[in-house]
């Protein structure tokens, strides 16, 4: 039979694990709502979860690291049907998604061209709108469609999630490239500027802990892993973790312009928290308190 002290130790480990899981989500989502001290998570050796501090704009600019990404802010674009349609009409962030909108209503709302121009006419719920005569009437009809029509709300939800995923993927790729670059610069004996703190301090710590690992080993993302504390924080959407081009939205994926391959590694957790507490607390009570 286990000693009481061993049971207490196991119970405390379980409680600490649950405290981590139920904490506030500190993963950077790059959606305009991140805290200034959020983290860009990654894996080392496919299993060791690292909370990387974010490399800020000045650090990225020092090494001229820029990954092209939609310029719009999803928190604003997707705040309402009105804002969504205004972006379709005047912005560029949703240009890749235009061709799929309204297809089930009779062929779609936009032409299949480089910029997704408005069609001469569109149909919604069997009513045809002459966009050549009045583009405003067509866009007003779209606002109603995306606000109150089941299919329209679904399409807007899908497009907004794809936009969030794409931006998050692009920003995480920037961070992956930056970590690789800082590692390489330090190995060549170059000084790392203070604008790259506290990321550089954490990277130094991990480089010391894994001296045989090449610099690319610190660039991996977490792919589909749910960060402890971030359960249930994913926005409603398609749920497939892909951007509009089919890439994953988890960071550390893709190729840089200089040929550096940055890829992600899958990692899945299978833990049911309540069973830990119930079993350990019951055994603890029976063996130690009775």
Image (cartoon, rainbow, N blue to C red):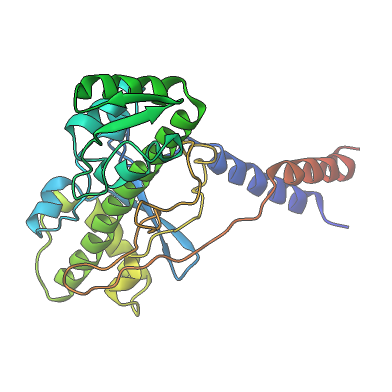
- Asked whether the viewer can see residue 19, the reply is yes
- Asked whether the viewer can see residue 194, the reply is no
The image quarter containing residue 64 is: bottom left
- For the N terminus, give its image quadrant: bottom right
The front one of 218 and 152 is 152
The front one of 16 and 62 is 62
In the rendered image, the vertical position of residue 146 relative to residue 284, given as above or below: above
Q: Residue furthest right?
A: 290
Count up the numbered dots: 0
Residue at horizontal 38 percent and vertical 19 percent from the top: 144
The image quarter containing residue 50 is: bottom left
Please indicate whether residue 82 sits to the left or right of residue 58 in the image. right
Tell me residue 190's x, y (percent): 9, 69
Please indicate whether residue 288 sits to the left or right of residue 122 in the image. right
Tell me residue 251's x, y (percent): 36, 56
Tell me residue 57's x, y (percent): 15, 46
In the rendered image, the vertical position of residue 1 relative to residue 44, given as above or below: above
The front one of 71 and 87 is 87
Residue at horizontal 37 percent and vertical 69 percent from the top: 209
Residue at horizontal 28 percent and vertical 24 percent from the top: 138
Tell me residue 54's x, y (percent): 27, 48
Please indicate whether residue 190 sits to the left or right of residue 174 in the image. left
- For the C terminus, give its image quadrant: top right
């Amino acid at each position: 039979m286990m000693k009481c002290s061993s049971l207490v130790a196991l119970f405390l480990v379980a409680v600490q694990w649950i405290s981590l899981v139920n904490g506030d989500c500190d993963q950077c989502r790059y959606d305009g709502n991140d805290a200034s001290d959020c983290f860009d998570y990654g894996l080392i050796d496919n299993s060791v979860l690292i909370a990387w501090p974010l490399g800020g704009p000045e650090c990225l600019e020092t090494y001229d690291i820029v990954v092209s990404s939609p310029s719009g802010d999803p928190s604003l674009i997707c705040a309402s049907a009105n804002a969504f349609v205004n972006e379709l009409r005047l912005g560029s962030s949703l240009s890749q998604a235009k061709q799929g909108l309204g297809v089930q209503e009779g062929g779609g709302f936009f032409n299949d061209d480089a910029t997704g121009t408005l069609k001469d006419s569109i149909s919604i719920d069997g009513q045809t709108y002459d966009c050549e005569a009045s583009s405003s009437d067509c866009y007003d009809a779209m606002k109603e469609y995306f606000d109150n029509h089941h299919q329209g709300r679904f399409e807007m939800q899908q497009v907004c999630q794809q936009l969030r995923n794409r931006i998050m993927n692009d920003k995480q790729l920037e961070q992956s490239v930056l970590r690789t670059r800082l590692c390489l610069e330090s190995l060549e004996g170059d000084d790392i500027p203070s604008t790259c703190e506290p990321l550089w301090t954490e990277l130094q710590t991990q480089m010391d802990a894994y001296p045989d690992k090449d610099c690319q080993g610190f660039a991996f993302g977490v792919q589909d892993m749910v960060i402890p504390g971030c359960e249930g924080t994913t926005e409603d959407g398609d749920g497939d973790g892909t951007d509009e081009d089919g890439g994953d939205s988890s960071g550390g994926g893709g190729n840089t312009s200089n040929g550096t391959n940055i890829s992600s590694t899958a990692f899945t957790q299978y833990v049911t928290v309540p069973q830990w507490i119930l079993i350990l607390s019951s055994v603890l009570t029976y063996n130690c308190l009775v």
